[in-house]
Amino acid sequence: MNVVLAEYLPILFFLVIAGAVAGLCIGGSWVVARQKPDVEKSAPYECGFDAFDDARGKFEVRYYLVAILFIIFDLEVAFLFPWAVSLGKIGLYGFWSMILFLAVLTVGFIYEWRKGALEWE
C-alpha cells in the first residue's frame, strides 16, 4: 500500500507548491496594492456604464443566433488542425474528404449570409 501512495507523492508536492504560489501571489497583491476603495470602484460596472434595466431582461433572438453560428463554425474549423497535422499520412483520400467538408461548410456559410443571419441591426 505504501508503494502505491508513494506514486502519488509528486502530485501532492505539485499541489502544495501550486497552492503556495497562488497564496503568495494573492497575498503579495494585497500587501502591495492600495486598499482604498472609493465610490467609483464600488459602483456596479458592466460594459463601461451603469446598469439601467433589470438583469433578467430579454435578449433578442439574433444574439442567440449569432452565438450559435459562431460556435458551429468555430468547432467545424477546429477539425482543420488535426487534418493539417496528419495530411501526409492520410493521403489523397483524406485531402479530398476535407475539401468536401470545407465545401459544405462554405455553402452553409453563404446560405446564412444570404439569409441575413449575420447582419446586426
Image (tube, grey):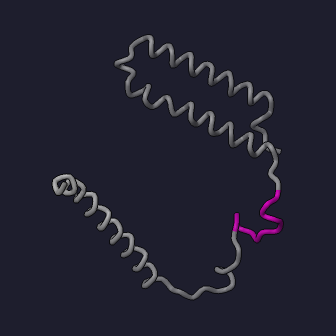
In front of the other: 18 or 29: 18
- Figure quadrant of residue 39: bottom right
Residue 44 pos. (x, y %): 70, 74
Residue 55 pos. (x, y %): 78, 63
User: Vertical placement of 59 versus 38: above or below?
Assistant: above
73 horizontally vs 31: left or right = right
Residue 108 pos. (x, y %): 68, 24
User: Vertical placement of 16 versus 35: above or below?
Assistant: above
Q: Residue furthest bottom?
A: 36
- Label count reads 0
Residue 58 pos. (x, y %): 82, 54
User: Vertical placement of 25 versus 75: above or below?
Assistant: below
Give the magenta range: 46-57
- Residue that appears at 82% across and 65% down: 54
Q: Is residue 62 one of those drawn in magenta?
A: no
Q: Residue furthest left?
A: 3
The quarter of the rendered structure image containing the N terminus is bottom left
- Residue that appears at 62% across and 24% down: 105
63 horizontally vs 4: left or right = right
- Residue that appears at 74% across and 29% down: 112
The quarter of the rendered structure image containing the C terminus is top right
80 horizontally vs 52: left or right = left
